[in-house]
Amino acid sequence: MGWSTYVAFLFAAINTLTVTYYLAIEKAPTLKEIFPSFLSYVFIVTAIGIPFLVAIGYLHFKKSSAYKAEADISFESHPHLKRITGQYESNVYRSDKK
């Protein structure tokens, strides 16, 4: 995954801003008064959109059980994580005492 995911999101955001401005806003006179240029549209949407998306992501992270379930599945599917977190050694010691 790495940095390519962030580049893909950047290109998707640029594409969305360009398409929505030139296909929707430029043809609507009322919206054209609110957003007179493409740069003003980008600044306003970015100033509103980024804090809104961060708040949605934070609420999803804190209130949703999806993140906990994803972390549990990731932990179970990668056996090396047990060794890194120290649970491997405790399991070995327990099995030796039997």
Image (cartoon, helix red, strand yellow):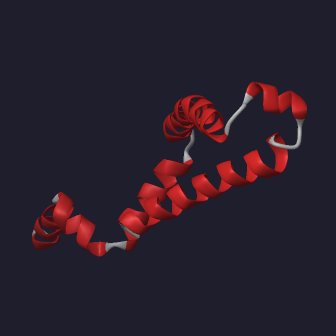
Location of residue 58 in the rendering, given as x and y in whole percent from the top left corner:
50, 35
- 16 to 94, vertically: above or below: above
Residue 38 x %, y %: 66, 41
Rendered position, 58 above or below 34: below
Choose between 91 and 78: the one closer to the eye. 78
The image shows residue 49 at horizontal and vertical percentages of 60, 35
Q: Quadrant of the N terminus?
A: bottom left
Q: Check the image and report above or below for 8 versus 44.
A: below
Could you say which quadrant of the image residue 35 lies in? Answer: top right
**Which residue is found at the position 42% from the left and 56% from the top?**
71
Task: Tell me where residue 72 sits by quadrant.
Answer: bottom left
The front one of 20 and 74 is 20
Q: Which of 14 and 86 is in front in this view?
A: 14
Front residue of 64/96: it is 64
Q: Is residue 36 found left or right of 80 in the rendered image?
A: right
Q: Name the residue at 57% across, 41% down.
A: 64
User: In the current view of this chain or complex, which residue is farthest to the front?
Assistant: 37
Residue appearing at x 33%, y 72% in the figure: 78
Left of 75 or right of it: where is 25? right
Q: In which quarter of the image is the C terminus?
A: bottom left
Where is residue 37 shown, x and y percent of the image?
68, 36
Vertically, is 14 above or below 60? Answer: below
Tell me which residue sits at (63%, 34%) in the image.
45
Question: How many discs mark residues in the rendered view?
Answer: 0
